[in-house]
Image (cartoon, rainbow, N blue to C red):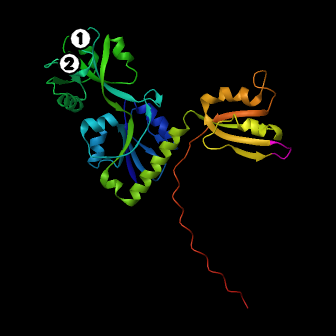
Amino acid sequence: MLRLVIPKGSLEEQTLRLLEAADLHVRRGSARDYHGTIDDDRIERVSVLRPQEIPTYVQDGFFDLGITGQDWVEETGADVEVLTNLQYAKSGTGHGTKIVLAVPNEHPANSAKEMPAGSRISTEFLHVTERFFDELGIDVKVVWSYGATEAKVPEIVDAIVDITETGSTLRAHGMKIIETLLTSEPVLVANRASAADPALRAAMDDVTTLLLGALRAEGRVLIKLNVTEDALEAVLAVVPSMKAPTVSPLSEGGYAIETVAEKRLVNRLIPAAEGGRRHGPARAADLQDRPVGAVRSRRRRPVPARRPVPARRPAY
């Protein structure tokens, strides 16, 4: 049904992991293949292409759905519908990227406004950079870069506009960041005509729900523990949860507690729930934690009711 395109390059590995976590495993003959399939009737085929090209291809109808960077949607000016932001980057979940202006450490400018007119700036983001300096009213020369942008300073250009997560590569090359032009993260984009089709839109909504559920599950665990009746309230007071823990009575007395919580909280929960010298007498036992597959928050579309089966006439 849907023709999906995902980014090749730095985001490829994390995108494939996200799809797999969402039960949308991409099958390819090898990691070098540009096309693959997903064993799901909502997705007809998958292509792996450069993220720079994806917004335009989705806009022009070659694909119904695509994952690309917000930065490339801005750079290309593609007319696509952004269905949702996907908070992950090449280093993992929750890390966005920034398009920044960087100069050599010895450069006198400490902000974009201090860049002298006539400065040469190398970048892949020609339009973003030109628009930014046009708004500042500074006449600069923007030069296209085919890669290794930081290597061109200061012999060829005065500054660069590049994408970074932490800025460590720029610092390692003796550069300082003096301005952030744009913050960016992966986005799920759709062709507008496809999104207007009810059947395709329903499939897009399903894919969106699956991807967001997989992202929400990152860093969360399912916690299970048993507790005596007299300690139930005290344990519930320290057990974290997304909404409220599930409490079930045990046949031998006491209660079983289940909850989903952030993994980083588990190492504080265990001593607080099980007790000890600092936290008092033992209150919980058999505590387990395990990864969760996905966390869904959207309401499922209702399943159409079946037509009632007419009652049979009694035989006489």
Image side of residue 113 versus residue 201, left or right: left
Q: Residue at x 17, y 30 (%)?
A: 134
Q: CA distance from mark 1 to mark 2?
A: 9 Å
Residue at the extreme right: 252
Quadrant in which the N terminus is drawn: bottom left
Residue type at the position of mark 1: Pro
Residue 79 visible in the shown view: yes
Where disc 2 sits, the SS reads loop
Residue 34 in view here: no
Badge 1 vs badge 2, beta-carbon distance below 8 Å = no
x, y percentage for residue 269? 68, 30
- Which residue is at a point 26% across and 8% down the rendered structure image? 106
Disc 1, SS: loop
Residue 115 badge: 2
Q: Which residues are magenta?
A: 250-254
**Which is more toward the observer, 217 or 266?**
266
Q: Quadrant of residue 194?
A: bottom left
Query: Quick one: label 1, few (<14), some, or many (20+) residues within 10 Å?
Result: few
Q: Main secondary structure of the magenta part?
A: loop
Rendered residue at 74%/33% (across/down): 287
Up/down of 144 relative to 288, above or below? above
Magenta span contains residue 277: no
View extreme (top): residue: 106
Q: Please state if 313 lies on the left or on the right of 28 as rendered.
A: right
Residue 8 placement (x, y as % from top left):
37, 33
Q: Which mark is residue 108?
A: 1
Q: How far across and how far down the image is residue 52, in percent?
A: 29, 34
Labelled disc at residue 220: none
